[in-house]
Amino acid sequence: MLLLTQITVLITIFAGIIALLLQHWHRLAKFFSFALLGLSSCLTIFIGSKTLITQQTLTWQMVTAFPGLNWQFTLDPLAAFFLAIVGLIVLAITFYGPAYLRGYEKKRSITNMLLCTALFVAAMYLVLLASNVFSFLFAWELMSLSSYFLVIYLHENSVNRKAAFVYLLMAHASGLFILASFGILAKFSTNLDFISIHLAHLPTLWAHCAFILALIGFGMKAGIIPLHVWLPRAHPVAPSHISALMSGVMLKIAIYGLLRFVFSLLGTLYWQWGVTILIIGTVSALLGVLYALMQHDLKKLLAYHSIENIGIIFIGIGLAIIFMSTNHPVLAALGLVAALYHCLNHALFKSLLFLGAGVIQHQIHEQDLEKMGGLIHKMPHTALFFLIGCISISALPPFNGFVSEWLTYQTTLQAPMLSSGILRTLLPISAALLALTSALAATCFVKAYGAIFLGRPKTRQVRHAKDPTFSMVAAMGFLSLMCLVFGIFPVFTINLINSIPQQLLGTGLITTKNWLWLMPLTGNTTTYAPLLLCFGVLTIGGVVFWLVSCRPSNYAKKIKDAGYIPWGCGFGKIGATTQYTASAFAMPIRRVFKGVWAVTETLTKDNGNFEYNLITEDWSWRYFYEKLEKYLTFIARKIAYIQSGNVRIYLAYMFFTLLLLLWLVI
Amino acid sequence: MVGYMIWVFALLQTILFVAAAPLLSGLVKWLKCRLQNRRGSSILQPYRSLKKLFKKETIVANNASFIFHFTPYLIFTITILISATIPLIIANSPFTYIADIIVLIGLFALARFFLALSGLDIGTAFGGMGSSREMMLSSLAEPALLLAFFTLAMNAESTNLSTIIQHFITTKHLLFSPSLIFTALGFVIIAVAETGRIPIDNPDTHLELTMIHEAMILEYSGHHLALIEWASQIKFMIYCVLFVDLFFPFGLATSLTLNVIGISCLALLAKLFFLSFTLSIAEINLAKIRLFRAPYLLSFAFLLCLLGVLNHIILEVR
Amino acid sequence: MFSFLPTYDQLEIIISALLLLTAFIFLTQNRISNLITTFTWQSILLTIATTLQAYGNVNKELYISAAITFIFKVLFIPYFLRVFVKKLDIRHKVSNIKHPFLLLMGAVVIVLFCYHLVAANKIALNMNSNITVVAMAIVLLGMLLLITHHKAISHVIGFMSMENGIFFAALVATNGMPMAVELGIAFDVLVAVVLFGVFFFHIRSSIDTLNVDRLNILNERVKE
């Protein structure tokens, strides 16, 4: 198993090197690179699931020349779970990537892309496996850098360059915060590896500082509000399979980092941390979905939904910390399982949606929702899989999104177990806001799906769209199948995930051999049987269909759909522009939640033609980041007075510093 | 023997639920007509109109997709499945273990998702209007509904519907606890919003520009429309029976003896009649409110349910 | 659990919950007649609570207290206020809160704060139920009404609501105030209402409006 893990990482790195070696033969480079990536992802899935089942932990070290800076890796159930998630998504990308890159091959070289993709995936594996501070930070930086090169792949457009710059800036800022928090931990521990940090004891104030720094660092990478501004800029700009990787997997690596930090490294938990994470999660979820509702660029919409889902994961983690710090470990295990399940689910359906967005962009070269429509007739398979993605992300039964939300609701329902009245009220309010979030997410995806696939085509480019090649459709089909499987067999998944709370909290949920009923807590008669639900729907649906459509009798009817045009209120044939647009669909929500966005709405008339402009912006960019930038520029200008450019003044600085040091030392 | 009988009873209960739903809608319409001094159509009129729709020709527009064809069956099936999990006459039906109240909310959301998609499918302005308004109102109603269910679940320490109802039967309240009063009031407002009665939506007229549910199903005809209409009547009955079961569960059968079931049937008839009467009086006296005043009403329902939770935590649990 | 309490306690809890509801409803009302109606209902509930307390603790003085509350706060003061409203011809909206939902959430936070205060000091304050939380919340929500509404007439209602809250707190915590204090407070309230009425005419005639924000005219700053 140890050898297998090492081979996997090496294969991934080799996938990048081979792209470099076979630079001039594009097809071969693409084939071998993706094939090796696919092999490594299959191995990762195997390693991950085997470790979760057997619950063993492996460690190994590699010594470098620098003293105290050696590489140390550990494979334990927490890392194994996230490894399996990465593997699943990379496997789907392996099928999707070659056909997708065919569109770019003619205009630019893809060597850079293949090399950086392989390095990115290898860096993610290394972050998950790292078990001392040096290897963790090294792998983290490698991940940030390689993803920057992937985001800036289409660098001709200045918007893309700016977006990639913001991304790089915030990725490095998050790295600095994580470094600072590790610094605090390192101060109190004997050695720099995770085991000795876990055994070290931190005074309360330092623990709070370390927690806040880690929360800001990992939160910035995960995309919580208000540290989220890079997400909606970077994700639309990158190629679609990279967006899928970043949104589906890289955000989960940040969640892994936070989990590892809080549960593994900081030994004792405080309920204040749980409340902070819970409130941040709720606010991020609600604001994320509200911002997403107003977007009409498909990828930006999906990026804001990633913020929402990260908020939901944070809610689960916050609940786990609250219950753990008030001595309810089984309930904490439930919260942790809910959060981890949602990590898995989000990776699956978000990647599915981004791959679908990539197909749409490939076919009609548009990302604007207002310019699509009627694509369900042109690309039926893509439409079906995108629909499954939309249903999953709106948390509707029987798909996987619903199971993790159900588990989160069950955890919040255990609020009466807490002794503090404030916490007992906070949890139901948080659950109610989560319900509002998922209802608004369903609204947003009805809007998105309706604007893209349903209705009538709004522009001419749509006419030339068709279903993409089999491999791209197969990748999306694979992810949809995984969504369905993890929705119908939740008990099986929870039995797998259960080893993680066992490791981190000391207890796990009580696992049952009963694969049909999901009963997370014994003694409490709450059950959910998704397979039976599916079975019931299919049976009843079949019976109804037979009774109504197929049986020849007095009530038999024939569906005639020969050329009936939609009802136009008596005006005859109506054009495609009278349909409800995506912005019109979201208008009632905009009126209800007026204060959330910074809306600029203008209606100009110039000789009979009206022009309507609607710009909705994030408050945090204008009021937080621009002010921060102004402040920093102001300070920088003041400091710039030191830099006079005169050589003699610099010599004078050196002279006076030397005098000062001599005086201090002697 | 008992185990076998209870499955038969549960199945019979579901069939009765589905068959009796148009009767309840007909009863409410008849009561409204009578209270307005009109003769009105008979109580059995919804059955006649469903029969008429099933016989009629189904016309589908030329750009309808598989979602348009698929939705009526899906909605009808989901509504039947939900009605199977609601205790109508016997309190501990085995079907309730498949889906608890949170799954109930999820299933309603799934039906609404597909209905909204089918509204957008043909590409007319009416469908878009109906879908957009329906999704907005249901988004605002969902947190209140979840809080209401939470209060009930915290009272009964379970989210399973039959466990909650049996808890309320056995604790035999002489009076209502304040959390239940507020939750009941909030639930009434949410039920009005979700089933599309006055003051949120007018179920009697078919003007697309002002209606919500009717606008979404404008393009449907024939047996598709029959299935959707029947499904909305079953949904109305589901909310009525939920209200009656959760807040006035006296008389529900907890065992399978014949006289207990008889009492349960009579109690159900009395409760539903009384509820229909109250609803008719309310519908006659109120007017439909403007669309953008509906969020204020729903936020008031949210406040009531939140007060219910607060009251439960502050006043009732030591 | 609620259902295991004696009937008397159950009724008390229900009435306190309904009183809390009326305090919330004050914050949502836009029209003055609705405010006065809600105040009437609040006073009716208070009368019922006092009568219950009198019946349960067999305290004859509380019957008189209930009668005073009924006569003054249910019959006399609302009638007086309605007469005022007609004479002063107040027709506009009473408050212009931009986001009423946020105000309600703020009120919920205040209730939680009261709960936290009482629950943390329960043993020290020697209480065995949480109804005092409701009483404190009614007082604080009355003050919130004073802050958010800008018409002077609703300040009167807010002040009345606070007095209701104090009376309810005294009722629950100490089984009714001493009679002298009760009569004193009742007459104070009555005089306050009469004085308010007189002052309103004067305010209106001097600054032509009853919007308290316009009282800013009376400040001493030199206008540039």
Image (spheres, rainbow, N blue to C red):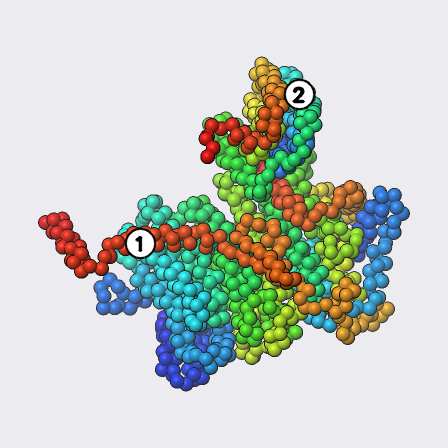
- Please, what secondary structure does the residue beneath circle 2 have? helix
Viewed as shown, does residue A82 lie left or right of A546? left
Please state, as top left, top right, bottom left or bottom right, where the N terminus of chain C lies in the image: top right
Camera-nearest residue between B78 and C182: C182
**Residue at (58, 14) in percent of width and height:** C180
Compute the Cα span from label 1 to label 2.
70 Å
Task: Tell me the mark number nearer the camera, choosing from 1 and 2.
Answer: 1
Residue with the most extreme left position: A666
Categorize mark 1 by other alpha carbons within 10 Å: few (<14), some (14-19), many (20+).
few
Q: Is residue B155 above or below residue C212?
A: below
**Mark 1 chain:** A
Camera-nearest residue between A308 and A641: A641
Q: Disc 1 designates what residue? A: A637
Viewed as shown, does residue A323 lie left or right of A66? right
Total labels drawn: 2
Q: Disc 2 designates what residue? A: C72
**Residue at (58, 34) in percent of width and height:** C149
Categorize mark 2 by other alpha carbons within 10 Å: few (<14), some (14-19), many (20+).
some
**Residue at (42, 82) in percent of width and height:** A29
**Mark 2 chain:** C
Query: In this orientation, does residue A385 appear?
Result: yes
Kind of residue at badge 1: Arg
Q: Which mark is residue C97?
A: none
Quarter assignment of residue A141: bottom left
